[in-house]
Image (cartoon, helix red, strand yellow):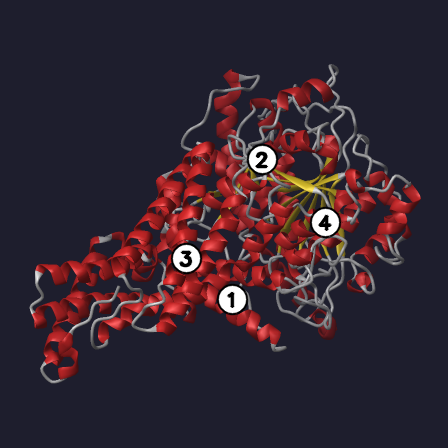
Amino acid sequence: LFLIFGLLTLVRVIVVILFFTWRMRHRDSDAMWLWWISVVGDLWFGVTWLLNQITKLRPRKCVPSISVLRDHLDQPDGGSDLPLLDVFINTVDPVDEPMLYTMNSILSILATDYPVEKYATYFSDDGGSLVHYEGLQLAAEFAASWVPFCRKHCVEPRAPESYFWAKMRGEYAGSAPKEFLDDHRRMRAAYEEFKARLDGLSAAIEQRSEACNRANGKDKEECANATWMADGSTQWQGTWIKPAKGHRKGHHPAILQVMLDQPSKDPELGMAASSDHPLDFSAVDARLPMLVYIAREKRPGYDHQKKAGAMNVQLRVSALLSNAPFIINFDGDHYVNNSQAFRAAICFMLDPRDGADTAFVQFPQRFDDVDPTDRYCNHNRMFFDATLLGLNGIQGPSFVGTGCMFRRVALYSADPPRWRPDDAKEAKASRYRPNMFGKSTSFINSMPAAANQERSVPSPATVGEAELADAMTCAYEDGTEWGNDVGWVYNIATEDVVTGFRLHRTGWRSTYCAMEPDAFRGTAPINLTERLYQILRWSGGSLEMFFSRFCPLLAGRRLHPMQRVAYINMTTYPVSTFFICMYYLYPVMWLFQGEFYIQRPFQTFALFVVVIIATVELIGMVEIRWAGLTLLDWVRNEQFYIIGTTGVYPMAMLHILLRSLGIKGVSFKLTAKKLTGGARERLAELYDVQWVPLLVPTVVVMAVNVAAIGAAAGKAIVERWSAAQVAGAASGLVFNVWMLLLLYPFALGIMGRWSKRPYILFIVLVTAVAATASMYVALAGSLPYLHSGIKLV
């Protein structure tokens, strides 16, 4: 398949070269300005297609050897030499990111199959919400039963919501098959109680706060609107339900609380079954990993840098507490679907061949609750399973925001071993500058230990509360390289891609790891408007990156040439919208007078176009075969690319134009996730129509193509076209029909609940074409200039 893929790519390159040579020798058109636009557009598409293809010529599939890892690092007495690991999970708003998803993510992390004393979890609540704080307390309490249950019965997945609602499960792999059914029933009842407590948490906090405020009414200035913690005597330091000065979003002090302490090194067996505790965990290790709640300080006048800023605070705090050499990050709506995922990533980090030069291991994003046909291409498998697989054979995949394991020192801007100078002093001087990391002596002293991936025992935390609090302040990063050459990058919407690029530019490589079952799963926006906003943020951020100091063209020699090509293509793809929009407007020519040819002689031009399109389709078929994809994956990718170019990419181009003029630019809306119940309710969002200006350009494109087909039909009726004329017009109408097919998911999206019956869309389109044709026939008598006909080719 790879040989066929390469040969077809070569054939198409030759055909495209011959095509452009022929066109330059035959500069003959009925409108030369359109001819030049079409030539430049075809050249752009040819070059960008080639840039995309050459990065896929050496795909590399990496399979983790977890059994070999166990043989080398697991000890006979139950101990382990696996390296330490810090887990970051981020959330902001308990409404946009429902608590149930977030706490399921926490529970899946706490229950993963990794030595419990070897990893710590850092939960960043960037909204400073008491709901998240107490929800995390409830999750830690429930985990005391859920985690031993998972270990005893080896259940998968270990997020309870996904586990209890799973339709199919594999063979039982636990140690107590006779107790499984009773344990499962009791655990499910306990989980339903946990969900009910989570669901009622907001109301309980509000009622408690109102009662405490009434009881403390004598001090109205301080207590009138306060939010109170569970003890009833302590005001919450973070965001209050009724915002007040120093207690609202964007303005509150730093909060750090260790919810679960660092466990002991030796196993601690759980409780035997009793009347108060019916689950028997007497033969199961009941320890839980360290769990830390973080809400960084926020103050007016500071740009808090959203997710990237929160993760850099996690990076500093974790360095002062556990300082693991490896870090894995999650969004609040993603959970561990395969309990072996952490071990899989460690396989590549410790690989004796190139593990030392690996900065991060990226897993693909997989989603629950997506409709069976993946209408809006949420799975994006052409990107994850084809593009990233191709990059895996060069310098590695880009970072895509979640489900990624990092080497800590790489985030500190250290050089990879193969690029480090021989002299250690020279190496340090070449990379590290004064005040690069801030003024925390403890943090700077922690950096050498972070480079030791063989360190398997966590260092005891000796840092005081004042130094921890200082690491979470807004002012800590002033005058430093945080968000620039240290940590996650700031001031670009796609901070994930830019951070990965910065590591590749330094000479590090990365690895793409797909495994079965999927390592991680999450939720995706299945509403058309939310999906388009998500693509707008990605495309706008990509253009921002290209026009910033992180432009791939400016990178040094440490970036592999093909990796540079991939990043160029990854950051310039929205520019295609200019040329595609011109093609969208060509059908308007059906409303003009006379016969019209974009290129003459037409027969040769048509033959070239047919061959070029045929080779693209053949290459696409071969590509989905070697990537293990389906035809539907490929079709959805093509459809949503066209949908993006009609309305989203023009907005991204406008954003860059405004930024270049010193104006703020387009505001990128964060994707909201909705909490859903049964299968029918989970898909309800698919049929929800949210009308926004972003939808208008695509609606116009659809209307233009429908009008073009109707106008052609009207001309045929008025002028009584012969069969030869109809056949000639059909060559132009194929483009219109093809465009409507590509915009089919969008059309269903704006139909709302009517899209449950797709045949209605067909009836509407046929009716619109018939109405346009009838209007053309009716106007033909009163407007004689319409009576001459046109052929657009």
Q: N-terminal of the two: label 1 or label 4?
A: 4
Q: N-terminal of the two: label 2 or label 1?
A: 2
Q: Position of residue 312 (x, y in %)?
A: 73, 53
Camera-nearest residue between 388 and 344:
388
Camera-nearest residue between 344 and 506:
506
Name the residue beneath numbered marker 1: 652
Q: Quadrant of residue 190?
A: top right
Name the residue beneath numbered marker 4: 557
Q: Position of residue 222 (x, y in %)?
A: 74, 71
Instruction: Say which quadrant the N terminus sits in.
Output: top left
The residue sitting at 52% across, 44% down in the picture is: 54
The span from disc 2 to disc 1 (Cα, nearest Å) is 31 Å
Image: 246 above or below 420: below
Disc 3 + disc 4, Cβ < 8 Å: no
Name the residue beneath numbered marker 2: 513
The span from disc 2 to disc 4 (Cα, nearest Å) is 26 Å
Label drawn at residue 20: 3
Secondary structure of the residue carrying numbered label 2: loop
- Kind of residue sitting beneath label 4: Arg
The span from disc 3 to disc 4 (Cα, nearest Å) is 33 Å
- Kind of residue sitting beneath label 2: Cys
Question: Which of pointers 1 and 3 indicates the residue nearer the eye?
Answer: 3
The residue sitting at 85% across, 36% down in the picture is: 459
Q: N-terminal of the two: label 2 or label 4?
A: 2
Q: Is residue 720 left or right of residue 790?
A: left
Disc 2 + disc 1, Cβ < 8 Å: no
Question: Which of pointers 2 and 4 indicates the residue nearer the eye?
Answer: 4
Residue furthest to the bottom? 782
Q: Is residue 704 left or right of residue 565?
A: left
Secondary structure of the residue carrying numbered label 4: loop
Mark 1 neighbour density, 10 Å: few (under 14) some (14–19) many (20 or more): many
